[in-house]
Amino acid sequence: FKRQAGSYLWLPPVKDSIEAIKFLMKALPGRVWFLTKPPKHTPYAYVEKALWVQRYFGDDGLHSLIVTQDKSLIGTVNSVLIDDRPHKANVEKFLGVVFHFLSEQYPDWQSVIAGLVFLAAERATARVDTE
């Protein structure tokens, strides 16, 4: 699958993903990034992933795309990574919080949004407690 031309370009979006990500992009302008790891030895996957993001999120999405083989190089302790394959690309070394998308805890975008709201409230409470 991954080595066939067009594999990434024509992948259908996960249910509710486009709406959820557009909601996040509007709520957090300039703070939502697309972080992807293309398969090694498949150079067209880089372009196809970029075109896919551009198709659904326009130039703003394209300008927010980061392509890397090592996701641990991106972000800070305050960052959140939503990833469906956290066993790949050094995600276990990511400095921030990882939401394992499509897992029992985060099976869909509704649960991810709820988790983000909870995390934001938790962090806000922690800031108030330290002041």
Image (spheres, rainbow, N blue to C red):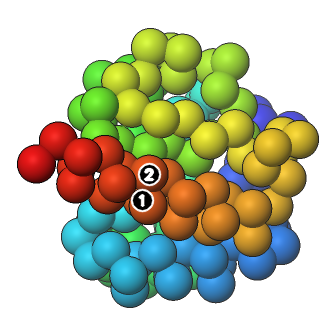
Is residue 45 at all visible to an observer of this figure? no
Report the amino acid beneath label 1.
Answer: Ala
| Mark 2 residue type | Glu
User: Picture coordinates of residue 52 (x, y %)?
Assistant: 58, 67
Up/down of 43 relative to 33, above or below: above
Residue at image point 83% right, 73% down: 15
* Front-lying residue, 71 or 97: 97
How many other residues sit within 10 Å of disc 2, few (<14), some (14-19) or many (≥20)? Answer: few
Q: Which mark is residue 9?
A: none
Secondary structure beneath label 2: helix
Is 72 rendered above or below residue 119? above
Q: Nearer the viewer, mark 2 or mark 1?
A: 2
When the figure is inspected, residue 120 is found, relative to residue 89, above or below; the finding is below
The residue singled out by tag 2 in the image is: 122
Q: In this view of the protein, which residue sits in the foreground, 8 or 73?
A: 73
| Residues at discs 2 and 1 in contact (Cβ within 8 Å) | yes
The residue positioned 89% from the left and 41% from the top of the image is 104
Q: Secondary structure at mark 1?
A: helix
Name the residue tied to disc 1.
Answer: 120
* Drawn side of residue 123 relative to residue 46, left or right: left
Instruction: From the top left corner, tell me how far across and down residue 95 is, in percent.
Output: 35, 24
Quarter of the view holding residue 33? bottom left
